[in-house]
Amino acid sequence: MEKTKKQAIMERFFYTADEIIEKPFNWAQMWRLLSYVKPYRKNILPLSFLMVIIGTAVRLLIPILIGVYVLDHAISRQNPKLLLQLILIISGLYVINYAANILRIRWMNQLGQHVIYDLRQHLFTHVQRLSHRFFDQRSAGSILVRIMNDINSLQELFTSGVINLLTDLLLLLGIVVILFTLSPELTIAIMITLPIMFFISTSLRRKIRRSWQMVRLKQSKLNSHLNESIQGIRVTQAYTQEQENMAYFDGVNHENYQSWRDATRKNAMFRPLVELTNAAGTAVLIWYGATLIMNGTVTIGIFVSFAFYLGMFWEPISRLGQVYNQLLMGMASSERIFEFLDEQPSVKEIENAIHIKKLKGDVEFEDVEFSYDHKRKALHTVSFSIPAGTTLALVGHTGSGKTTIANLISRFYDATGGTIKIDGIPITDMSLSSLRSQISIVLQDTFIFSGTIMENIRFGRPNAADQEVIKAAKAVGADDFISRLAMGYKTEVEERGSALSAGQRQLISFARALLADPAILILDEATASIDTETEVKIQQALKTLLHGRTAVMIAHRLSTIRDADRIIVLDHGKKIEEGSHKQLMNKAGIYSGLVKAQYSVS
């Protein structure tokens, strides 16, 4: 039977291999995670710990007061005065415990929010500094999951998990000491069930940890697909692929649901295990405790105190299981967070990198080679120079290496061979900030940020005055359409500027680049989305604006590069031809053929 489209799409998802991190519990990594608490160890943390100690001490004291003193002393000896005093003391202790818990929860929530804020800020700042190669290998959705979901999953660990761990450990230690003090033989009898519970719960740990790792992976896939679907909705609808896209989402969503279901099911197994052990311990207490009472070894008050402490004993045991689950979730998330934090930029500054205040713009490529995957070369020993203030145009078929050259000038990637110099200085010796701050790039698919048009143009030079922004917009012909908008330069544009036409977005991008007043201007298919009338305006503006500025123009529309000082024709990463438009046309080579072919088509 032939497979349906939906089955094929589902299989494309279901048979995708997942990368599950198979590692033991990494305490070094957990200490690294807890290092984010250090900035608050002198204020919030000590106060929280003080409340923990007060609350724990109160809880340990109350069962002794009820069992030993109320029953064995006040009631059995019929002492109403002592009984009243004990009632007032116990009531006061409950009030103290209540207040301590309120303050502990408040301060720990503050601590948790501070830590989550710092961790998210650290991760976002680090991601901003990573090289283009990092983003080439990962989807926007998977990065978003790390910064949002994975860090959010650590919130409960920091707000309650760590402090609960300390509270429960102190409570357990105190209970065990008190129980052995009251009756060693009864304590040993009820503790006999502990090894059984420990053995069973230990076998669950690896499975639980693996389940939470799977949850994180499925969430990452779900977010990645959502991001792609939203970004590509026009293409999906244009090709009527809505049903196939929904079928794929159904598979991703189902897998996410199944991973959560599996993880929560395994988590849910721990508490019943504790309750079962508690029931067994209670049965031992009743049977053996009654025997000791009848033998006169223990009093009824001690027996009642034991019952209180036994109930208190299994409560932190159960919570420790929950805390351990939080730790497992935290480890699954922290592994993914630290994977990003440990990622180093492939483009690095050297020590004592040169900070250039003002570049002239002399660009020189000396036998430059480059490969994106270290296998296939995108550039083969390319050499050329661009004197300051001149314009170089790069021409060639898709994949010939034009954009690669632009990326190398901006040092988004480092050349794998040869040297690139600006003003006679290797760009690897320059600080990245001083290099990139003096280079502006206009891409074919320009990005418009949420905010006003004024803010978008000012993006490359935040301190520019309003009049400077307007002047740059007028220079590229953007002022005409901006002035016609209801709010003018204060018009709010949504993400990616969806309310603007492609040509309008490109004009804003031109104004943004020119306002930055760069020494080097890179135009990568910058006029591809602009109509002929607008293109004429831009060509007129560029003649003035490019004067005295080094420019690299990449264009398939060859009419836009006629006035370039020099044109280089590339083919499969190799320089084939070089010269002015007139020289190359007279040569009647590849460039001439491209121009004639383009005009014949148009």
Image (cartoon, grey):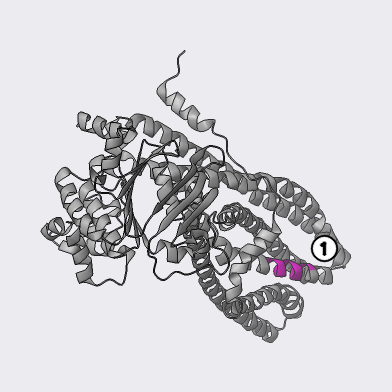
Asked whether 60 falls inside the magenta stretch, the response is no
Crowd tier of the residue under label 1, counting other residues whose Cα lies within 10 Å: few below 14, some 14–19, many 20 or above: many
Q: Is residue 527 visible?
A: yes
Q: Is residue 397 left or right of residue 28?
A: left
598, 194: nearer the viewer: 598
Task: Check the image and name the residue furthest to the top.
Answer: 1
28, 203: nearer the viewer: 28
Residue where numbered disc 1 is placed: 187
Asked whether 173 falls inside the magenta stretch, the response is yes
Could you tell me residue 411's position as x and y percent? 46, 55
Q: Is residue 299 visible?
A: no
Q: Secondary structure beneath disc 1?
A: helix
Q: Quadrant of the C terminus?
A: top left
Magenta stretch: dominant secondary structure: helix
Looking at the rendered structure, the number of numbered marks drawn on it comes to: 1
Placement of 62 over or under 456, stated as above or below: below
Could you tell me residue 568's position as x and y percent? 36, 43
| Region rendered in magenta | 168-176
Residue beneath the point at 53% across and 56% down: 347
Q: Is residue 578 left or right of residue 29?
A: left
Q: Is residue 373 left or right of residue 470?
A: right
Could you tell me residue 246's position as x and y percent? 37, 34
Placement of 561 over or under 28, stated as above or below: above
249, 318: nearer the viewer: 249
Residue beneath the point at 47% across and 29% down: 10
Placement of 103 over or under 543, stated as above or below: below
Q: Amino acid at mark 1?
A: Thr
